[in-house]
Image (tube, rainbow, N blue to C red):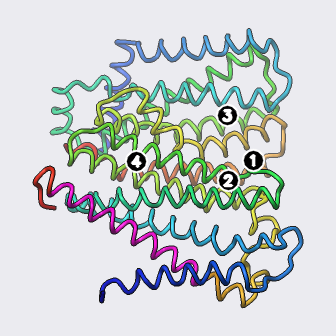
Amino acid sequence: MNFTHFILLLKKEFDIEFRQKTALNGIVLFVLSTVFVSYLAFQNIIAPHVWNALFWVILLFGAIITASKSFLNEQKGRMLYNYFVYSPREVILSKIFYNSILLTAVSFLTLFLFSVFIGNVVQSLGTFSLVLFLTSFGFSSILTLMAGISIKAGGSFTLTAILSFPLTFPLLLVAIKVSKLAIDGIAFSVCIQYLLVLLLLNTIVSVLSYVLFPYLWHD
Amino acid sequence: MAKNWWKILAVLIVIYTIIAGFLLPVPRLDILNETIRNLYFHVPIWFAMLFLMGVSVYQSIMYLGSNKIKKDIIAVETANVGIVFSVLGILTGMLWARYTWGTWWTTDTKLNGVAITFLIYTAYFILRSSIEDEQKKARISAIYNIFAFVMMIVFVMILPRMSASLHPGNGGNPAFGKFDLDNTMRMVFYPACIAWIMIGCWVAQLRVRMGILTKKIIYDETV
């Protein structure tokens, strides 16, 4: 594990992304159109639990679409090159961090679009943002490994979705619960226990990804 | 015969738990009444399922360390039997819920947990079927199996503790805690757990032998 390598790999991910902009544009368009469809269907959502459910469903699909692209850019030659130069732990860490930065941006974009089109029902924005940060990291830890698995397994988007959906449910359920509290403006001292559970889940999934990825990488 | 005594023992104990489970007296608890007898079937089946999944994940970890295809066969077959036990567990639970809660299925963390566990392991089998190469299939599915097992433990052990649940054992509902389970029930319940685990191992053992023989006869590989 070399920190300079990690930074280099992270920078590489951003460089590729800004050069091609396919993943970023795709995900922005996805979020925009789904939020707009929801706006057309619902007009204005007043019931907080409907708002919450819709928000997380859109975010979950957005996250899977974002993360499923993580290994698409790696052609055979470059993968071989990376294989010799970097350790797998550096690769997975850089990809997890890259994806979680991207996912955080996507989740705040979704929140923004929700406020514009559907209305903002969130009362304590601070707690809600914290939930978004934590789930973005957790989702990206799970989804990056699953994207890697499905690429190795022949790589269809459906496979990524099938593999990751059930695994994201623990995080998702806790996130939905605590974000409902944040929407209702419940005191932070009540939310903190759920945030700690989110943190615990994040730790579990990121450690698992970090430990298991080398076995996937060595082909 | 010398090696088969435990199979006969398992069958005898299961027969004993069925007879004793339906005939021996049980404590009268509110709401539960006679349905408490489901404890002898539902809970041991879940224990057997957890045991089998535990064996499966252990073999997966061993496979990643050794690359021996036999470990992979054991891992997949124990998971296979485990998923059958989980279906049995869900069915016995649903039957019980119909007469205690008045509905086959309800929104509850434990129930959601088992449903998602079922989804996770189904995904595991789909992943296996989508890879051709033997070693690659074994390695990738071992990675998924480890991830899946940890997530299952999170789902059935950690999450139900942090929210209200209707399920016995949660929120003051009677279950097999030290005050609710009397000694007659223990006499049936503990043997039932052991017997169902043994039955699970027996089925898994047969399937593993079948898997190894298939490899040997069809693909001409020794494992």
Identify the residue position indicated by label 4 in the image: A209
- Do callouts 3 and 2 mark residues in contact (Cβ within 8 Å)? no
Q: Position of residue A17 (x, y in %)?
A: 38, 18
The disc numbered 4 marks a residue on which chain? Answer: A
Left or right position of B1 against A120: left
Identify the residue position indicated by label 1 in the image: B107
- Do callouts 1 and 2 mark residues in contact (Cβ within 8 Å)? yes
Amino acid type of the residue that numbered disc 2 sits on in the rendered structure:
Leu
Residue A48 or B168: which is nearer the viewer? Answer: B168
The disc numbered 3 marks a residue on which chain? Answer: A
Q: Name the residue: 39% across, 62% down.
A: B78
Q: Which secondary structure dominates the residues rendered in magenta?
A: helix
Amino acid type of the residue that numbered disc 1 sits on in the rendered structure:
Thr
Q: Position of residue A34 (x, y in %)?
A: 63, 15
Cα distance between the residues tagged 1 and 4: 31 Å
Amino acid type of the residue that numbered disc 4 sits on in the rendered structure:
Ser
Marks 3, 1: nearer the viewer: 1
Identify the residue position indicated by label 3 in the image: A129
Left or right position of B116 against B203: right
Residue A214 or B125: which is nearer the viewer? Answer: B125
Q: Name the residue: 53% across, 38% down.
A: A165
The answer to whether residue A143 is above or below residue B36 is above
The answer to whether residue A19 is above or below residue A147 is above
